[in-house]
Image: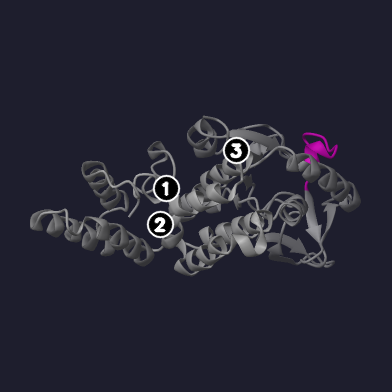
Amino acid sequence: PLNIRMGISSCLLGNNVRYDGTHKLDRYLRDILGRYVEWVPVCPEVECGLSVPREPIRLVGDPEAPRLFTVKSGIDLTERMQNWVRERTRELEREDLCGFVFKTKSPSCGMQGVKVYTERGMPCRRGAGLFARGFVAHLPTIPVEDEGRLHDPVLRENFIERIFTFSRWKEYESRNGTRAGLVTFHANHKYLIMAHSPRHLRTLGRLVGNIQTHGIAATRKSYIAILLSGLSLTATTRKNLNTLQHIAGYFKTLLTADEKREMWDIFEQYRDELIPLIVPIVLLQHYVRKYDIAYLKPQYYLHPHPAELKLRNHV
């Protein structure tokens, strides 16, 4: 179901909005992830009134608060862009986005490592595009990534996992947002959180245990911020192995000696990076069905996103 709405720099969908009249189509985002999300395209430069084609622009001055100039004619576009950013981020807040993919290195959309020039024309790569910076400041909870980093399979999986989790959170909030609902949400995400950060899992467990103290509204607000912060940490092989072993504990009295040996062999091959994560996951999914383990059936760690995205197939 396309209930996941996501923002994206318009050129990444193949729209000819760049300064030279071209695009930067990313086929994975448009054709594969695009089957599961509804894209909301944004081009800051065109939307704030610049033409296509147009004179290139660049950031100048302090990397923490750069100004935006046209390259040849030196026109200062800072105020124009910042006014547009303020208005557009307020509009995007109402779009109910679950994430945003920015164009790498762009003076309007780059998240990090964007060139900022000194008055004498020397570049350093410490800037962020004016729109990306404004978006993150105004909507800090929404998962964001830039398309260059998404070519890394680990970062891609991490980002898409956060998007789908945030979408489920929004669904929980819109359905009821009750205390019982939060307890269930937390229980179903336990092993997903563990694979990213056992420390965040403990913090969230305490938070859910103390709903009475803080009230449900305050607890929800803290919960989603801590959850997304934890999920932004990488699920390493070691952390995944720890999670797999925790889940395997549910089967210790059920499996035959042969099945146990096979399971531990597969865990070791995963640990030694001989096989991808999907292999032990599929085995555990099989045992969850075979032995009908009610607590594990809804665990999102075992199915955090559509299998067609092939996010756990890399070694």
Element marked by disc 3: helix
- Pick whichever of labels 1 and 3 is earlier in the sequence: 3
The region drawn magenta spans 45-56
Q: Residues within 10 Å of mark 1 (few under 14, many from 20)?
A: many
Say how the picture is coloured: one colour
Residue situated in front as seen by the camera: 228 or 179: 179
x, y percentage for residue 287? 23, 47
x, y percentage for residue 32? 48, 34
- The amino acid type of the residue labelled 3 equals Arg
x, y percentage for residue 53? 77, 35
Element marked by disc 1: helix
Contact, mark 1 vs mark 3 (Cβ under 8 Å): no
Q: What residue sits 26% from the left and 61% below the top?
A: 249
Quadrant where the C terminus is found in the figure = bottom left
Residue to which mark 1 is pinned? 300
Q: Is residue 103 left or right of residue 249?
A: right
x, y percentage for residue 305? 44, 42
Contact, mark 1 vs mark 2 (Cβ under 8 Å): yes
Numbered badge on residue 175: 3
